[in-house]
């Protein structure tokens, strides 16, 4: 493996994980219990991908080509045979090849995608910040700390997680390399749904 590639176990889900995002998961299938135990023991990561075809449970699903590295931040087993974990999103990656292990676990060679450069939210999209700030101020705040309202990539990712949009639309936002384009799409959505002041 080169510095920009890695071999990762994959966890195809009906959900999209963004860099710096938090995602709670319930793990009960043997292949994923073993994967989780290995990640905890070795302090390693796995990949989360939206399912392109198939189901979360049973035969290995076909994942979308772009996913996000996941590291386990918390774990608990309050139910026998069910492991509750909280993962945080790391680097985005693109799958180069896939392999199904005998236990049904999907593994892949992935190529890390370049991290989004840190840049401020442009003035043209600044009107989306107060709503996100209001969400962050609510009791039971769903936004993962640390809050970085001055970072266009962070703001776009948090909105992409929160908006009530289809998972395929969420995946399209994850795949965008241009963080300002992502903000423009989000701004247009918020305006169309009456959540921001309209232009003009």
Image (cartoon, rainbow, N blue to C red):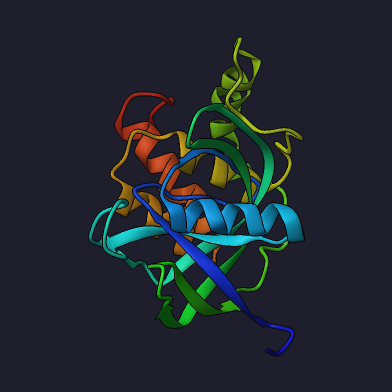
In the depicted structure, whether residue 98 falls above or below residue 152: below
Task: Please name whichever residue, 147 or 109, is drawn nearer the observer in this view of the structure.
Answer: 109
Q: How many marks?
A: 0
| Image location (x, y in percent) of residue 52 | 28, 63
Q: Measuring 55% from the left and 57% from the top, which residue is drawn there?
A: 34
Decide which of 192, 53 is in the foreground and name it.
53
User: Which of 72/141 is in front?
Assistant: 72
Q: Residue at x 44, y 53 (%)?
A: 30
Left/right placement of residue 148 relative to residue 53 reads right
Q: Residue at x 65, y 59 (%)?
A: 38
**Residue that lies at the very extreme toward the bottom in this rendered image:** 2
- Residue 200 visible at all: no
Q: Is residue 185 left or right of residue 40?
A: left
Residue drawn 23% across the image and 60% down it:
54
User: Would residue 132 be found to the left or right of residue 189 on screen?
Assistant: right
Point out the image quarter for the N terminus.
bottom right
Give coordinates of residue 137: x percent, y percent: 65, 15
**x and y percent of residue 96 in the render?**
47, 84
Please tell me whether residue 106 is drawn above or below residue 86 in the rendered image: below
In the rendered image, the quadrant that contains the C terminus is top left
């Amino acid at each position: 493996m080169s510095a920009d590639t890695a071999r990762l176990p994959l966890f195809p889900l009906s959900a999209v994980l963004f860099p710096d995002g938090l995602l709670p998961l319930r793990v009960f299938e043997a292949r994923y219990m073993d994967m989780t135990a290995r990640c905890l023991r070795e302090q390693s990561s796995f990949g989360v991908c939206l399912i392109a075809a198939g189901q979360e449970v049973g035969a290995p699903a076909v994942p979308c080509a772009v996913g996000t590295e996941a590291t386990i931040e918390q774990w608990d087993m309050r139910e026998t045979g069910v492991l509750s974990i909280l993962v945080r999103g790391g680097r985005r990656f693109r799958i180069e090849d896939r392999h199904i292990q005998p236990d049904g676990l999907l593994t892949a060679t992935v190529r890390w995608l370049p991290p989004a450069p840190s840049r401020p939210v442009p003035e043209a999209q600044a009107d989306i910040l107060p709503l996100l700030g209001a969400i962050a101020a609510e009791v039971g705040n769903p936004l993962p700390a640390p809050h970085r309202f001055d970072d266009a990539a962070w703001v776009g990712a948090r909105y992409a997680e929160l908006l009530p949009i289809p998972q395929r639309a969420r995946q399209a936002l994850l795949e965008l390399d241009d963080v300002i384009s992502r903000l423009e799409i989000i701004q247009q959505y918020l305006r169309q749904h009456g959540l921001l002041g309209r232009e003009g």
